[in-house]
Image (cartoon, grey):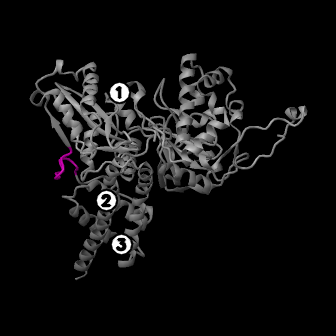
């Protein structure tokens, strides 16, 4: 009888958790599906609000499920045999589920919210996934196929645009098709002149919405080659749409899906099929990157952690201090063989830092929800992470004990970090310019200033503009991304001022300013003095971004934001746009 009772209990608990997940995914899908209507209405403010709101849904639904379990069942203590059965019953429930991998992650989140980390192993949670996501059937196909040999090249491209399903007319679809064909003909292996028997286009059946654009994503297959492409569709502001460009090749697609952009809205009942297609387009991108890119950041965290555990098991290098100047707020370390950095908040911050721990937590939370416009690194946030003690370099471990003792503890042979942020590792900008030739310095300074301007357009002021707080993605001429969020704030919270003229000649030689300074006052004309010790770097910056030293520039940005003007940020080069000089979407 007791066995029957336990079995019934395990089934009820498993059903309760899956019901909680299904509710979460239903709400997630509803707001994601709404991206099309928001795009059609050009309601950019609503899209940003929806993007922020969607990020918060997961934790709220996990909390709901956890509280319901506590209310319905006795969760005051851990019963091992029962939870072995719960996991087995849950596996049975998700065998034919459309999102089994997401359901596993939800189960993990609920379990970890109920019990101590002593039980966080594969017996009780899904450290390893057990349900295959290959070939999951759904009523909606994951992609459409077009055969130019049968339909015609021009007609195939036109049908790709029409099948986007956007309920607005194209401003001039024949013009857009002409532009796309012209670009494809110039690119190797996408021209009909070099078509093989299997020449075809495949386009993902779901449109990718982000900011003020909709993207049709697919690939051209020609013989053994697969060439990825994306077509950004923009709103004219007058009730019609147009194709702004075609992004061709792995490099362009990788930039579109870079970790520094806000997540896409992509509505599909089988997310794993979308991720599988994208991985075929960008083989260098891992599953965790692509799940995060389509808004399933918790699944991205799960897959990242699985990959990291696997890497730890198959590597021997030590965790060491990350390259660059040590931060006053964060202890930052890395595993040289793994392209990420780990950031732990220090117990105390030395002057001149005046922020509190809670303020730091708030700024990182702000970044997670905000439109990053391709200029702020995405963050993976974890609690109670156990790392092998022997993998820490001695000097790093000493500093963690000295400055982060409130955040670490020893359990067995592990160092347990209570709270850690993980970000993609980049080359600090101050290091990148060391030894760089004049051309590279100019490229980096142009990108540095542009990053600041794009952040300003998105209502973000970095606070500390020192070069060490910005990174370069990739090698050589990479993009500039901001990654130190200790002092960021909304641009509209700042008071940009010009330095008043001195009252007397002696004022200019005084060690103290002759004017009052409030906490939120910012004096842009001082930026160059504090940031650029190297005259060559200063000169390159002033060549392209002298306007950043003028308070009027920043005040105008504030007025634009208050007026509801959302500036365009294109995650692709300006020179591939079709007639972009005549088409503006700044409204």
- Please tell me which of labels 2 and 1 falls first in the chain: 2
Front residue of 84 and 180: 180
Which label belongs to residue 578?
A: 1
Q: Secondary structure at mark 2?
A: helix
Which label belongs to residue 319?
A: none
Please identify the quadrant where the C terminus is shown. Answer: top left
**469 with respect to 170 (left or right):** right
Front residue of 235 and 378: 235
Residue 394 seen: no
**389 with respect to 489 (left or right):** left
- Please tell me which of labels 2 and 3 falls first in the chain: 2
* Separation (CA) of disc 1 from disc 3: 63 Å
The majority secondary structure of the magenta stretch comes to loop
Q: Where does the magenta region start and end?
A: 132-142
Q: Secondary structure at mark 3?
A: loop
**447 with respect to 292 (left or right):** right
Q: Nearer the viewer, mark 1 or mark 3?
A: 1
Quarter of the figure with residue 507: top right
In the rendered image, residue 158, in percent from the top left (x then y), is placed at 20, 33
Circles 2 and 3, Cβ within 8 Å, touching? The answer is no
Question: Is residue 4 positioned above or below 261 on the image?
Answer: below
- Please tell me which of labels 1 and 3 falls first in the chain: 3
The residue that disc 3 covers is: 79
Q: Nearer the viewer, mark 2 or mark 1?
A: 1
Is residue 139 a member of the stretch shown in magenta?
A: yes
The residue that disc 2 covers is: 25
Query: For the view shown, which residue lies furthest in the left direction?
Result: 150
In the rendered image, residue 399, in percent from the top left (x then y), is placed at 63, 45
């Amino acid at each position: 009888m007791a066995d029957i009772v336990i079995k019934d209990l395990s089934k009820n608990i498993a059903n309760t958790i899956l019901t909680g997940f299904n509710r979460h995914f239903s709400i997630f899908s509803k707001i994601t599906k709404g991206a099309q209507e928001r795009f059609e209405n050009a309601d950019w403010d609503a899209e940003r609000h929806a993007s922020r709101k969607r990020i918060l849904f997961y934790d709220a639904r996990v909390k709901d499920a956890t509280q319901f379990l506590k209310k319905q069942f006795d969760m005051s203590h851990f019963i091992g045999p029962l939870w072995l059965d719960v996991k087995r019953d849950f596996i049975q429930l998700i065998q034919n589920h459309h999102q089994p991998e997401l359901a596993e992650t939800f189960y993990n989140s609920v379990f970890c919210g109920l019990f101590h980390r002593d039980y966080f192993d594969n017996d009780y949670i899904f450290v390893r996934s057990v349900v295959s996501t290959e070939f999951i059937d759904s009523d909606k196909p994951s992609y459409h196929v077009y055969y130019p040999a049968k339909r015609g090249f021009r007609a195939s491209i036109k049908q790709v645009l029409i099948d986007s399903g956007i309920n607005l007319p194209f401003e001039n679809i024949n013009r857009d098709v002409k532009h796309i064909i012209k670009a494809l003909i110039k690119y190797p292996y996408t021209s009909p002149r070099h078509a093989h028997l299997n020449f075809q286009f495949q386009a993902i059946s779901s449109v990718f919405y982000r900011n003020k654009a909709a993207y049709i994503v697919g690939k051209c297959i020609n013989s053994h080659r697969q060439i990825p492409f994306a077509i950004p569709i923009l709103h004219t502001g007058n009730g019609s749409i147009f194709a702004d460009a075609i992004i061709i090749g792995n490099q362009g697609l990788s930039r579109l899906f870079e970790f520094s952009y806000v997540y896409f809205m992509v509505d599909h009942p089988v997310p794993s099929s979308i991720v599988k297609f994208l991985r075929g387009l960008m083989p260098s991108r891992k599953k965790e990157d692509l799940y995060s890119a389509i808004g399933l950041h918790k699944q991205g965290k799960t897959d990242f952690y699985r990959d990291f555990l696997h890497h730890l098991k198959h590597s021997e290098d030590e965790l060491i201090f990350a390259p660059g100047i040590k931060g006053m707020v964060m202890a930052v370390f890395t595993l040289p063989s793994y392209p990420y950095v780990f950031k732990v908040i220090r117990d105390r911050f030395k002057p001149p830092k005046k922020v509190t721990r809670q303020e730091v937590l708030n700024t990182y939370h702000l970044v997670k929800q905000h439109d990053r416009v391709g200029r702020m690194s995405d963050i993976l946030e974890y609690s109670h992470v156990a790392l092998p003690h022997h993998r820490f370099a001695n000097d790093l471990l000493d500093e963690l004990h000295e400055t982060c003792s409130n955040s670490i503890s020893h359990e067995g042979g592990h160092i347990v970090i209570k709270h850690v942020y993980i970000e993609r590792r980049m080359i600090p900008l101050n290091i990148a310019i060391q030894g760089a030739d004049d051309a590279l310095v100019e490229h980096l300074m142009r990108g540095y200033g542009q990053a600041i301007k794009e952040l300003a357009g998105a209502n973000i002021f970095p606070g500390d503009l020192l070069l060490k707080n910005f990174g370069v993605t990739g090698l050589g001429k990479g993009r500039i991304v901001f990654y130190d969020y200790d002092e960021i704030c909304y641009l509209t919270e700042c008071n940009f001022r010009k330095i008043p003229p001195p009252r007397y000649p002696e004022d200019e030689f005084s060690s103290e300013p002759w004017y009052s300074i409030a906490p939120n006052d910012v004096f842009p004309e001082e930026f160059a003095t504090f940031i650029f010790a190297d005259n060559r770097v200063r000169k390159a910056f002033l060549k392209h971004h002298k306007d950043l030293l003028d308070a009027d520039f920043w005040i105008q940005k504030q007025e634009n934001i208050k007026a509801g003007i959302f500036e365009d940020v294109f995650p692709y080069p300006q020179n591939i746009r079709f007639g972009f000089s005549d088409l503006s979407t700044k409204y």
